[in-house]
Image (tube, rainbow, N blue to C red):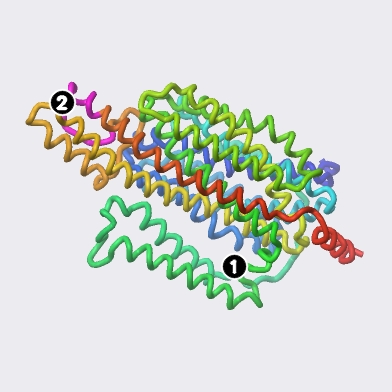
Amino acid sequence: MTALRKHPMAALAVLALGLFMTLLDLTIVNVAIPSILEGLHASLDQVLWVLNAYSLFYAVLLITSARLGDIYGPRNMFAAGVVIFTVASAFSGLAQDPTQLIVFRAAQGFGAAVLAPQGLPLMISLFPPQKRGGVFAIYGTLAGLAVIAGPTVGGLLVTHFGWRSIFTLNIPIGVVTFALALLLIPDLRPGRRHRLDLAGVGLASAGLLAVIFGLIEGQRYDWGVVAGALTIPEIIAGGVVLLALFLYYQARRQGGEPLLPFVVFKDRNFALMSVVMAAMGFAILGLYLPLTIYLQSVLGLSAIDAGLTIAIQPLATIVTSGIAASLSQKVNGKYLLVPGLLALAVGSAYIDWAAQADSSRWVFAPGLILSGLGMGFIWTPVFSIGTRDLPAHLGGVASGVINTIQELGGVLASAVVGAFLQNRLALALRDQAVAASGQLPDQYRSAFVSGFSNAAHTGFEVGAGQSGASLQLPPQVQAIAHYVFTHGFVDAMHPTLVLPIAILLLAAVASLFVRAHGVAATATVREEQSAVA
């Protein structure tokens, strides 16, 4: 065991296991959304908070926890994060209502934020510069596989053990990860003194919370008054003002220890990869949120069948990940990233085109294969490109920043895509209800149309087996109600999926400006070697 403790690859394996657990949990929830909606009688906006409670806490606390790793040692903070995450997972599995689940998911996000940024500074310390490319390729591949394997694993668990099992699964994994962390990860303690930017955390948290609240809850309140004279646009505008104050405050603190250090963005590759990571965070959640609901609530697939349908994608990713890992050491990373992002965008566009109310699950195979092949060329080089020119002392900062940006992409996707989906669903359900009401007896038409028209105000019910509106209608009318919901959801889904596709195309354009491994990287290596000497 002592020999293993001194072996960097053993530490890397434990760090990857911890990261895999948190990222898997982030995406595994997606396939369970219809079951959570049904099991806890939750609405679509409530389940969006289940997603965002995790992401919001995770995003705003990453950089602060990276600083705490510098003070108390990354190994110790990693282990503490695993404990918090595991305990929160246990309570999430015991939640009895949507509010409890939202609170416990926030605690999960807190634990994930504590452990996630500790990996990068440890790898920079344990591996010499010339070996980091391969290490980051391994780390990036595992991270990518965790993100896209979530729906498959989640579908298996939800079908056979219920939605609570996606949280209780973390308990044994967390216990093993905690024990291995103490045994195999060296206790490196930089011992750096830091002044934690709590004011920055407060401004960023309040600003993001206000913007996300406005986007998620906007449709419920008709984008108007929430309470008293306070309106949804005012809440969103207030959040934007707070975020602007946060950036101004950070600019004033650049000479000290800001929460968001602008220095890392001076490296062009890091800045560009931050854009790519944000785009990936947005695109993955933006695609899976409507798709997993569609597969179960529109096509009527079970959670396991939905998961197995999506499983085609990670299998395709495995094929190209190994190829990308070897090529990333030989060619400029943009020659992998640009085709990968374009393939993911085109594959997603095919999925959007193929989605109809009566589609076969296998009609999506070409899009899933193409998008999966593209992902293999994205996750593998992105971390290596983003961090290869950074000096070691910026490792913790860079880890916090790039993970924060990726997570913010997911937060924005959940809020923006969720808001757009709810808005389009409100319009589509009303239009479909009006069109179908002609098939009903006169005494049912008014209730039928108003039931779907008012669905947004009571919270959209889009769980497995639900019709999409709470209507008190005879059984023979329910078939028409189901028709309205399925076709209305498809009509809303088509324009919604255009958002993540457009973001991917923008990321592909940004990747064209990646700098080749050259002068800057060589200078960084020499700087680190001189510091060691």
**Mark number for residue 223?**
none
Q: Residue at x 49, y 37 (%)?
A: 349
Measured in 3D between alpha carbons, the distance from the residue under mark 2 to the one under mark 1, in whole angstroms, is 60 Å
Question: Is there any visible trace of residue 17 in the rendered image?
Answer: no
Q: Is residue 127 magenta?
A: no
Residue 496, image x, y percentages: 41, 43
Q: Nearer the viewer, residue 284 or 528?
A: 284
Q: Nearer the viewer, residue 399 or 439?
A: 439
Element marked by disc 1: loop
Residue 424, image x, y percentages: 33, 44
Residue 120, image x, y percentages: 71, 53
User: Looking at this rendering, what residue extends furthest in the left direction?
Assistant: 443
Q: Residue at x 85, y 50 (%)?
A: 130
Q: Is residue 357 left or right of residue 350?
A: left
Residue 419, image x, y percentages: 37, 49
**Mark number for residue 439?**
2
**Which residues, given as a range, are shown in magenta?**
468-481
Mark 1, residue position: 259
Q: Are circles 2 and 1 on residues that touch, CB within 8 Å? A: no
User: Looking at this rendering, what residue extends furthest in the right direction?
Assistant: 533
Amino acid, disc 2: Gln
Up the image or down, 509 lies above or below 144; here it is below
Q: Nearer the viewer, residue 358 or 234?
A: 358
Up the image or down, 473 lies above or below 84; here it is above
Q: Quadrant of residue 258?
A: bottom right
Q: Residue at x 56, y 44 (%)?
A: 86
> Dot 2 surroundings within 10 Å: few (below 14), some, or many (20 or more)?
few
Q: Quadrant of the C terminus?
A: bottom right
Question: Is there any visible trace of residue 143 in the rendered image?
Answer: yes
Q: Quadrant of residue 338?
A: top right
Q: Is residue 469 magenta?
A: yes
Amino acid, disc 1: Leu
